[in-house]
Image (cartoon, rainbow, N blue to C red):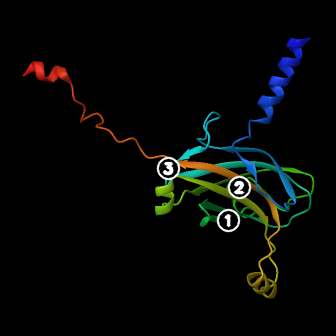
């Protein structure tokens, strides 16, 4: 009996930590994500190791609590409170996103996107940051509404995923042509 309880608890704990490196950063989202995967971010790697200029590829499986006609992805990196824009794209019009609009309430969707990690001096110096990947409702309405929104931006968030990253640098070494070999000395 103890063995069965131990196995069940182990599976439960393992299942609950598979997305442990990613956080839900949505304050008032009209949806919830159930699975997130980032290409190149291994299971035992925390935070995700990225290179500046490298593309961050993400897949977010989510459901919505409301019907949404148009949506976009907004991605930014935060280094010690300084936010740098990475991407804004209309996910309904992007064939590669995997999402077809409208997003009907209660259904599950899987969004796929990519954004380039910016080459930022502060990011290079600090080496750690958080990427915020938000899927938001995009109301494509009249110019008057767009003007009002620009004055007082109100964005309805669907989901938000926080991804901690560490900047790694390419290994610097002698490589194939610069290797020192003791055997070469003996042949001379």
Horizontal relation, residue 136 to residue 55: left or right: right
Residue 82 lies in quadrant: bottom right
| Whether residue 120 can be seen here | no
Question: Marks 2 and 3: which is nearer the front?
Answer: 3
Which of the two residues, 110 or 186, is positioned nearer the viewer here?
186
Q: Is residue 62 left or right of residue 173?
A: right
Residue 163 visible within the image: yes
Q: Name the residue under label 2.
A: 97
The numbered disc on residue 123 is: none
Query: Label 2 near label 1: C-beta < 8 Å?
Result: yes
Tell me if residue 63 comes above or below residue 172 in the rendering.
Answer: below
Q: How far from the left and from the top, in percent, is residue 12?
A: 83, 29
CB under 8 Å between discs 3 and 1: no
Q: Mark 3 points at which residue?
A: 51
Image point (63%, 33%), residue name? 44
Label 1: state its secondary structure: strand
Q: Give how far across and how far down residue 59 sits, in percent.
A: 70, 48
- Find disc 1 in the rendering and name its residue: 89
């Amino acid at each position: 009996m103890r063995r069965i309880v131990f196995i069940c608890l182990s599976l439960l704990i393992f299942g609950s930590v598979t997305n442990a490196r990613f956080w839900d950063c949505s304050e008032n989202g009209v949806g919830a994500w159930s699975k997130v995967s980032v290409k190149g971010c291994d299971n035992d790697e925390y935070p995700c190791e990225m290179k500046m200029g490298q593309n961050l590829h993400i897949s977010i499986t989510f459901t919505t609590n409301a019907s949404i006609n148009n949506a976009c992805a907004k991605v930014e990196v935060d280094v010690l409170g300084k936010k740098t824009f990475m991407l804004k794209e209309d996910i309904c019009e992007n064939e590669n996103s995997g999402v077809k609009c409208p997003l009907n309430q209660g259904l599950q969707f899987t969004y796929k996107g990519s954004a380039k990690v910016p080459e930022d001096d502060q990011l290079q110096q600090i080496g750690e940051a958080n990427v915020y990947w938000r899927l938001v409702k995009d109301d494509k309405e009249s110019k008057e509404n767009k003007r009002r929104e620009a004055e007082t931006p109100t964005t309805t968030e669907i989901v938000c995923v926080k991804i901690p990253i560490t900047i790694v640098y390419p290994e610097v070494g002698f490589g194939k042509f610069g290797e020192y070999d003791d055997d070469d000395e003996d042949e001379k």
